Amino acid sequence: MKWEDSLEKIKGVGPKRREALAKAGIKTVGNLLSYYPRKYIDRSVFGNPEQFFEDQEISIKATVLNSGRLNRIRGNLSIFTVPLLWEEKKISAVFFNQPYLKSSFQENQDYYFYGKVKKAYNGTKITNPQFVIASNPGNFFELTPVYRNIQGIPGSVIPKTLSQIFAAELDVLDAMPEEIRLAEKLLDMKRALKVIHFPQKAEDVIQGIKRLKFNEALKEDQAGATYALEQISLLYGVESMADDQELDYQQRAELRSRLAYPILLGFEKWIVSYMPKALPGGRMSKALQYTYKLFHRLSRYHLDGRYKMDSNLVENSIR
């Protein structure tokens, strides 16, 4: 299967779906491969009941204290509340307009929940979370790509179609010289596309984006792009060191404070000094401005060993 092949060759993409995809600018295999996820759901990031960020979606493991209470407000409006014990902290899972969940929870059973935990006047709540029983999580913790909605295309069609494409003998042209790719430790194009659409972990996506964006930034500002990538690689090197040594959360936080935090401080200073030198309106300039604006989100992971490097930057890099 080639980049320029029509989607009509793919099973399950009939005339109506081809028409709907074409309206979104997707007519060929290459168009679909270039239709990147807008974000990724990473349920492997667990929160700490003593320290969590209310703007970040996290996973928690909690015990259901009872089967919950359903309150019908008016008409079809309802609130279903389930009391939970998160480690030693009592919180509530709150579901709006989902009365069918009333029989979904078993008392004194452990569940994994994924969502935003927030403090309110009447207690701490996790609102409309995704959940699964802890004894059988299935694929709950797999990194899940989320694509922008296309009218007339069910959500499952894009990943299923992409799966068929990668299962075929896919021919992807890679114009980058092999010596440059190896020297910069970049993925080949086919592998980069695969990990963007079917990643196993957030680091896979970072490497895929790094490969796709490297050419663009390199053409515009080789020195700046190379330095920035080196700093990101150093940060992931610290994470790899922690993984290799099988450090616990506290030990990982200590390692990050000792090794990663100085890198982050230096990286932030470089961004501030380099922004005026970048081509105004160029890719490098936009990337630096965006990264600096959200630098506190990128850097705060070193405060707690439970947190991973912020994968939300991945989805915005794609934009």
Image (cartoon, rainbow, N blue to C red):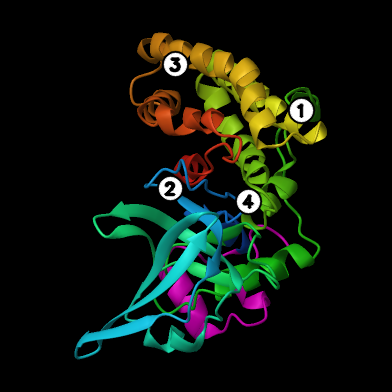
What is the spatial separation of the Cα atoms under label 2 and label 3, in whole angstroms? 25 Å
What is the spatial separation of the Cα atoms under label 2 and label 1, in whole angstroms? 25 Å
Residue at 71% x, 60% y is: 2
Q: Do the residues labelled 4 and 3 touch (CB within 8 Å)?
A: no
Q: Choose mark 4 or mark 3, whichever is in front.
A: 3
What is the spatial separation of the Cα atoms under label 3 and label 1, in whole angstroms? 25 Å
Q: Earlier in the sequence, mark 1 or mark 4?
A: 4
Residue 16 among those drawn in magenta:
yes
Residue at 81% x, 31% y is: 245
Marker disc for residue 196? 4
Residue at 47% x, 71% y is: 21
Q: Which residue has dot 2 on it?
A: 56
Front-lying residue, 143 or 283: 143
Q: Choose mark 2 or mark 3, whichever is in front.
A: 2
Q: Which residue has dot 3 on it?
A: 271
Q: Do the residues labelled 4 and 2 touch (CB within 8 Å)?
A: no
Marker disc for residue 241? 1
**Disc 2 element:** loop
**Outermost residue toward the left in this view:** 74
Q: Residues within 10 Å of mark 3 (few under 14, many from 20)?
A: some
Residue at 62% x, 28% y is: 253
